[in-house]
Amino acid sequence: MKHRIASTFFCAGLCMLGQSAAAADIAPVAMTPEAKQVETESGWTFSFAPYFWAAGLSGDLTAFGQRTVHVDSSFGDVWDHLDFAAMAIGEARYGRYSVFTDLMYTKLSGSSATPRGFLADRIEVDSETFAGFVGAGYSLLQDNNGHFDVVGGIRVWSVDTTISISGGVFDGRSRSDGDTWVDALGGFKGTYFLTPNVFLTGWGMVGGGGANIDWDVAGTVGYKFNDTFSSVVGYRALGVDYSNDGFKFDVVEQGPILGLVVNF
């Protein structure tokens, strides 16, 4: 009975992992060059942007040594259980060279009453995911209309799930499972202005290391309002396949992205 109840709510908890990163890591460089950047006397330019990714999640998840669960959650499902999310990117460029970072943190939670309430009255599931990418790039092609860069870097993933029990025989007990790993990725990104205000941007990266494969592709269209603000909207897909010692995180996240670039 104990195993059946824990397994049932564990499966429900896995379905709440929706934005494990969401949890997610966007190829940040692709979203910063569109707006006019601030150039220092040293020749460096800097830009920073928060962004929002309305991603759904599909794939296979395993934790606590339980059976693998297939998840197919829309962004609406994820939103219902989202407690907190923070996503931001930054880039510094010097001529053809660039360094960049993208940090994402999400926290999801949910709870449900048990069928009979003897072993437990309620089971709560909390999921936290951090995904951070740090990389560098070099422009193979560059002119006044845009640039085409080769990029490479590392992505750090950290996923943690906690199940807590309240009431009943097992009141106050909790259990956590998760893992942290690092992947190396490489690929390309580019930005091209169709007009002084309208531009296209996109990227594609693939790699692995801790994961069997880790990939990220996207395409967006943007508009520069003025020298301070610009925005981008498009579509992004990211996939990662990681497994280790009974923990499995083999998912694809995809959905619309929206970014607001602020230059200062």
Image (cartoon, helix red, strand yellow):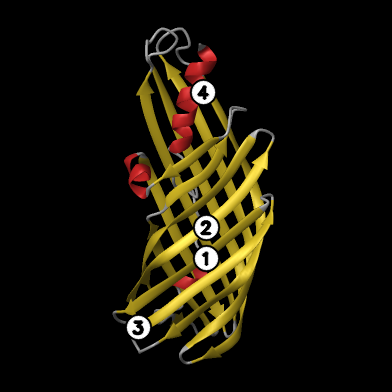
Image quadrant for the C terminus?
bottom left
Q: Position of residue 221 (x, y in %)?
A: 38, 75
Q: Which residue is the site of mark 3?
A: 198
Foreground: disc 3 or disc 2: 2
Q: CA distance from mark 2 to mark 4?
A: 28 Å
Q: Amino acid at mark 3?
A: Val
Q: Helix or strand or loop: what does disc 4 sit on?
A: helix
Q: Earlier in the sequence, mark 1 or mark 2?
A: 1
Q: Amino acid at mark 1?
A: Val
Q: Helix or strand or loop: what does disc 1 sit on?
A: strand
Q: Earlier in the sequence, mark 2 or mark 4?
A: 4
Q: Is residue 85 above or below residue 61?
A: below
Look at the image and tell me whether residue 264 can be seen.
Answer: no
Please give left or right for residue 251 compared with residue 126 in the image.
right
Q: Earlier in the sequence, mark 3 or mark 4?
A: 4
Q: Which residue is the site of mark 2?
A: 238
Q: Amino acid at mark 2?
A: Leu
Q: Position of residue 148 (x, y in %)?
A: 56, 82
Q: Are marks 1 and 4 in contact (CB under 8 Å)?
A: no
Q: Are marks 1 and 2 in contact (CB under 8 Å)?
A: yes
Q: Which residue is the site of mark 1?
A: 217
Q: Helix or strand or loop: what does disc 2 sit on?
A: strand
Look at the image and tell me whether residue 94 can be seen.
Answer: yes
Q: Earlier in the sequence, mark 1 or mark 4?
A: 4
